[in-house]
Image (cartoon, helix red, strand yellow):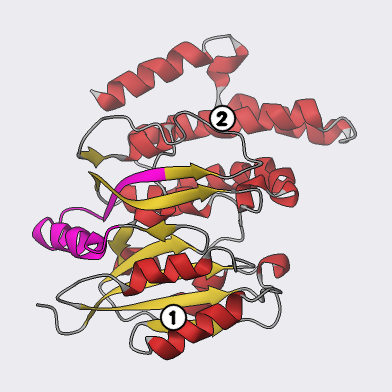
Amino acid sequence: MMVNTAVSVLILAYNHEKYIEETLKGVVKQKTDFKFECYVHDDASTDSTQEIIQSYAEAYPDIIKPYFQKENQFSLGVKPLTKFIYPLLKSKYVAYCEGDDYWTDELKLSKQVSYLENNPQYSFCCHDVNIIFEEGVPVKRSFYQKPKDGGFNVKFIDEFLNHFIATPTIVAKKDLILNIPVNDNLVSGDIYTLLYLLSHADGYYMQDKMAVKRRNPGGMTLNKTYREKADVGRYRLWKEVLHFAPVQIKPLVRTKIAEYDRLFIKSQKSTPFSEMIKILYQAINNDPYWFVGLSSSRKRRLISQIKG
């Protein structure tokens, strides 16, 4: 049995009055033989989200630790976890959940912490998930496309090729989380985090479905402002990932960066000619094989070599 706090659960909430109670219920019902706490960051909600969080903080003071903002930090370009919550953590592991998702297995934390304690070579543990598509959201038969069935080791190349790990399923080593390089990119933070963890060690994917991921019209990735920033954000993301990507995968990351270089050349018609030439040079430098029509075949060869 762990005496000190083993897990810090981190929840980001904003105008989640329809969902936040179910999210918090999934946390407080966890059965463990170790201590855990839950930091709930509310980004200045304008509905009753804060009141619901406060009621749970009063009912479960040893677990629920609310952090209320008076001004929306996301709109200011601030990363709430990095700036406000991470400095408070004293646990060994960090678990994540969004304010509109929820956990369904009361042994979720216990199973994942036990696995990581018995297999310290892994940087994180995650698991399978159920998806709920709410009204107004296009339904995808297979939203998260896993590279394998059952339980398996997750490698950097797996997440690089296909983002298939849902945020509410992650339990990771806190020391690695706190060492993630700080950047100003607010897009695809979960992918950035996972790739950083996987640059240090494999993760492990459990086949248990212990959480529900909601897809709703108010979700961040369906937000119009978010989508408009997505291409520029992902371009920055891959340039940042290049710094810590494994050596054998760096050529693939450069290829990804070049794809966005070419996208910007096509989409930014009003960009000055000199700037266009600069972007074109970057694209060719990052992926010279594209210029001679061999980019796709080279990518397939690199992936085959990496996967063995």
- Given residues 229 and 111, the one toward you in this image is 111
Q: Residue 246 lies in magenta, yes or no?
A: no
- Given residues 199 and 140, the one toward you in this image is 140
- Position in image of residue 58 (x %, y %): 44, 90
Q: Residues within 10 Å of mark 2 (few under 14, many from 20)?
A: many
Q: Which comes sooner in the sequence, label 2 or label 1?
A: 1
Label disc, if present, on residue 286 of the rendered structure: 2
Figure quadrant of the C terminus = top left
Label disc, if present, on residue 114 of the rendered structure: none
- Position in image of residue 130 (x %, y %): 39, 44
- Position in image of residue 215 (x %, y %): 55, 46
The boundaries of the magenta stretch are: 105-130
- Position in image of residue 302 (x %, y %): 37, 21
The answer, for residue 282, to whether it is visible in the render is no
What residue is disc 1 on?
87
Tag 1 secondary structure: helix
Q: Residue 121 lies in magenta, yes or no?
A: yes
What is the total number of numbered labels drawn onto the structure image?
A: 2
